[in-house]
Amino acid sequence: MNKLKIELQNCYGIKKLNHEFDFSDCKTFVIYAPNGVMKTSFAKTLKNIANGEQPCDQIDEALKPVYNFFIDNSNTQIKPEEICVIEHYNEKVFDLSEDKILTLLADDKTKKEYLAIFSEIENLKKSTISGLKKISGSSNYEFEIIESFSNLNKKNIFEIFEAILNNIEKSKDSFEFKYNHIFDKGGKVKKFLQENFMLLKQYIEKYDELISQSIFFAKNADHVFGTTEAKILSKSLEGDEYFIAGHKLVLKSHGEISAKNKLSEIIEKEISKIFGDKELKEIFDKIDNLLDANKELQTFKKVIEKDNAILLRLSDYDVFRREVWFCFLRQIEVGIKSLVELYDQKKSDLEKIIQKAKDNQSQWESAIKEFENRFVNNPFTLEIKNKADSVLNEETPAIDFKFQGKNIERNNLIENILSQGEKRAFYILNIIFEIKSRQLQNKKTLFIIDDIADSFDYKNKYAIIEYLNDLSKEDNFCSIILTHNFDFFRTLQSRILQDNKWDYSFVAERLKDEIKLIKAGSRNVIDPFSSWKHSVNNNEKHLIACIPFVRNLIDFKEGKDNNNYSLLTHALHRKSINGSVKATADIVIDDLQVPFSRVLSNISFTFADINKKIVDVIEEQITVIKTTQNSDSIVLEDKIVLAIGIRLKAEEYMWSKVSDQTAISKNQTGKLFQRYKDEFKQDQMHSEAIKTLESMNIMTPENIHLNSFMYEPILDMGIDELKNLYDKVCNLLLK
C-alpha cells in the first residue's frame, strides 16, 4: 500500500475528515490530536472496520456514517484483516475476573473468540447447576461432582455430565439428607465405614436374609424388592389419583388394594417388621453407639436413625456417592442436557483456539525475549508454562511470572507488587506479539497506534519510540501514530520522521464542520520563537505574539520589579497610568523597543508607523485573522493575538461595570472577574455575561502566558473557538 485515501463522516464524533496519506517515502505518519478532537474516534472507527463492524454516530443514530479507506488511487477498500489498531494502555489486560482467559498465549482476536465461547458455556453452566447448592446442601458442588466421578477419567464436568446423562434420567432415588451429612469433606464417615466393615457386612447380610424370608419383600440373583423399592412404590402413587381412576393393586401377601392409605399402611408395617427384627436391631445399635466420636459422625448418626436403609447402600461408599448425585442432578436434568449440547457444539472451536495457542508458542517466546531486551530493569521476568484452560481443561501455554527470581501468583503480583509503569510495560508484550505474528505471516498491515506511550515513564517511553522506529522500516507495514502528548509528538518527529517531518506529521484541528490535518513539520510548530524573532522588528502580528514571551524572559533575567516588565504587563492588561508606566490605551509600538532589545539581541524596529497604538494593532490584526480563510498551516501567533485581544476586551467591559475601581496589582484578570461576579451574580441581566467571562478566564491564560517549554495549550485550542469567544466578548461592550 502506497496511498490511503480517507473519507469519514459521522463516525463517533467525527463530522467530516477527508485526507490522503502517501506512504511512498515514509511508512509512518504522526498526528498530534488534542483531547476530544479525533484520536479515540478515529481509532474506534478503524477498530470497527477491522472487526467487520459498522461505525456510527453515537449521539444521533439517524446520521448516516461514511467510512471509506481507499488504497492506491483506486476504489478498492482496505481489507479488515489488513488493519491492526493498537489501543492505548488498557487496565482490562489485568482484569482479574478474566484471569484464566487473559493468560492464554494468543492474540487479542483469538482471546476474544475464546472469551465469547467461554462466557456462553460458563453462563449456562452457572444458571444450570447453581440450584445444586439448595438441592444438595453443598456449596462446593462442582468440585464434589468432579471428584465423585473421577473414575470416569473425563477432562471436565461437561464430559462427566455427558457420560452420566443416562444414569441421571434413570435415577428413581429420593434423598432427604444433605450431601455433606454423609460425604463429609474430611472423609470421616467413609473412614468409619471402612473401620467397621465387618459390622456393616453383618447388618447387610441379616437384612438380605430377612428380605429373602419375607412373603412381602423378595430377592434373587438379579432383582430385589426391598424396603427402598417399597418406599419408591409408595411415593410413586402419592395423591390417590391411581386409585381414584379405578385401578387396583394385587399384592401376593395381602390381596387386592384399592386405596393409597391402605397401601402405605401395609408397606410401613412390612418395613417395621424388617427393621424391628431383634438381631438386626442389635447390630444397628452397635453401629449407632460408635457414632458419637465427632461432629461429622454425630450428624451421620442422625441421618441413619431417620432412615436405617441408607446403611444398606453404603457397602460401596463411592458407588452410593455417585447414586446420590444422580438423584440430585435429576432435578436439573433439562438444563444438563442443554449444557451438554452446547459443549458439544463449541468443543471443536475451543480445540482449534487452544491448538492455535500451542502453535504460536515459539512466537511468544520470541516476543518475550524482545520485550525483555527492550524494557530493561523490570523487577519481574516472564516464562511460558503449560496450564489447564478454563473449559476443556487441556494443557495450554500461558504466561507465568517471577518477581526477583521468586514465583509469584499473578493476582498478587498485579494487585500488590507491580508499579503502574511496569504494568504498562507488560502490556507492550501483547503488542510485540501481534506485530511479530504479522511479520512472520508477511501480512500487509496498516497500524493505527493510539497513544501507546501515554503515561509511561521516560525509560519505557523511549523504548517504545525505538520499537516504533524499527516498525517504520518494515516493508509490509504502514503506521499512523496518534497522540495528545505534544512532547511525545515532537520526539516522534525527530527520532522517526527526521527529514520527513514536514510532510508526515500533522496537527488535527477541529473547525466548524470538519476536522483538518494540518502539516506540523514547520519551525512555526516545532520552534515558533525562531521565526518570530527574525521578524519581530517589522511584523506587527509577531510583535504582539512575542509580548508575553519577552515579558517572561525579562522576569527570568531581571525580575518583576522594573518598568520594562510593568510596561509589557500593561500591554496585556487594561491598566491606568502608573508612575512613568503608560496606561494600556496609550502604549505605542515604539514603547516596546526598549524592553524587547533588553532580551532579544540586535532588535531595531523598522515598522512603518512606530507611533501606532498597541490596542489598535491588536484590533487590526484580529480583523485580518477573522477574515482570513483557514489555511493548511498552524498559525500559533493568530491564536496568541486572539487570546490577548479577548483578555483586553473582557477587562475593558468589567472595568466599565464594577463599582470598585481600586487598582489591582497582581493577577488582575482573575481578581477583576471575581469582583464582577460578587457584584452581579444575583442579577439575571448579567448571567450570560458571567458565562462568557468564565470562558474567557478558562481559555485565555495558557494561550497568553507562553514559554518555550509549554505551548501545547495553544495547539489544543481551536482557532474557531477563539474567534467565537472574541465576538461574544465584543458584544458585551455593545450592550
Image: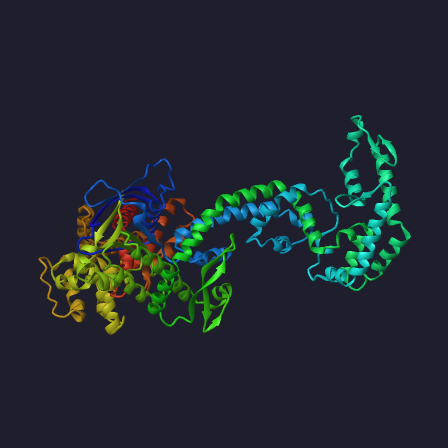
Residue 223: quarter of image: top right
Q: Nearer the viewer, residue 257 or 496?
A: 257
Residue 372, image x and y in percent? 36, 68
Give the total of numbered labels.
Answer: 0
Seen in the image, is 93 located left or right of residue 516?
right
Q: Quadrant of residue 296?
A: bottom right
Image spot of residue 622 (x, y percent): 20, 51
Tell me if 515 is positioned left or right of 178 in this view.
left
Q: Nearer the viewer, residue 236 or 104?
A: 236
Where on the picture, by quarter, is residue 270? top right
| Residue farthest along the top direction in this orientation | 246
Image side of residue 109 versus residue 710, left or right: right
Q: Nearer the viewer, residue 435 or 552?
A: 435
Q: Position of residue 589 (x, y in %)?
A: 15, 60
Counting from the top left corner in percent of width and height, residue 686 is at 37, 47
> Image height check: is 615 above or below 120?
below
Q: Can residue 211 be spotted in the picture?
A: yes
Q: Where 438 falls versus 552 (above or below)?
A: above
Q: Is residue 577 visible from the viewing direction of this image? A: no
x 37%, y 38%: residue: 60
Query: Colour mode?
Result: rainbow
Residue plotted at (26% across, 48% down): 720
Q: Is residue 489 above or below residue 81?
A: below
| Furthest residue in direction front, as rendered | 221
Q: Pick the quarter of the image with the C terminus.
A: top left
